[in-house]
Amino acid sequence: MAENRSVPIDFYGERAYWFTIVTGIFGLDIFISNLMLLWIAASAEEIRSVTANLFTINLALGNALVGSFYAFFQPFVLIFGANHPILCEICGMGNIMFAMSFLYTPTLMAACRFYTVTRLPSSSYNKLISLAFFTKSGAVTLLIICWSYGLLFCSILLYNGQLGEDPNGFCAAKAFTSVVLYIFYNMGLIIFALITGITTFIYYRRLRQVCR
């Protein structure tokens, strides 16, 4: 096991192999169910033509990727991760990126529902809001920006050698060696999660008030 890591594979012992089988089955279920949703969306133009559905499709994509990691990639990390740290880095990068999609997608869905419900012929929203939530190209661009943020965030951590946590902790978490990187991680992920959660709450609260 690489240095500067906590909770090595030895801590789990033989239980790790049973654990990865169980989580692999759950991952396969997540992967197949969300893959079916993506297949339905891909085969039905009526679904893809609704801008709001693009955010739901994006959430299904994130779930499918998470499921694929648990079902297909995790066993390789368990067996070869100690001698091949690149596997742990890939898992850590994917784990954070996919988790980010779970954070910002519900916020985008809440915002889209709010603006759709409150939209009237006489309404005049900001041009960026209208572009992002009422046009397919704008919604896709917004999602690409969100995924790019996750990729950039992970790339900075990867470049500085701070990635390495796989979904089940078989590679263990690497301790931060820099205060700046620790602050960057907290601001980039934890504060980001807090902001998206609060924003989602605000949009749904405003939507409830409108629908009364």
Image (spheres, rainbow, N blue to C red):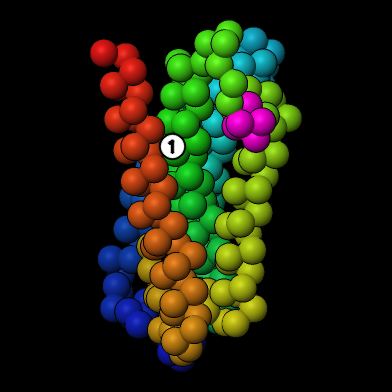
Classify 42 as above or below 185. Answer: above
Question: Which one is in front, 146 or 69?
Answer: 146
Quarter residue 65 falls in = top right
Look at mark 1 in the image and give the residue it sits on.
106
Q: Position of residue 88 (x, y in %)?
A: 53, 71
- The answer to whether 36 appears left or right of 169 in the picture is right
For the N terminus, the image quarter is bottom left
- Residue, x 35% and y 82% (percent of image)? 6
Tell how many labels.
1
For the C terminus, the image quarter is top left
What predominant SS class does the magenta segment belong to? Answer: helix
- Residue, x 30% and y 30% (percent of image)? 205
Q: Position of residue 46 (x, y in %)?
A: 64, 10
- Residue, x 47% and y 31% (percent of image)? 111
Q: Residue furthest right?
A: 137
Start and end of the magenta stretch?
Answer: 126-130
Kind of residue at badge 1: Pro
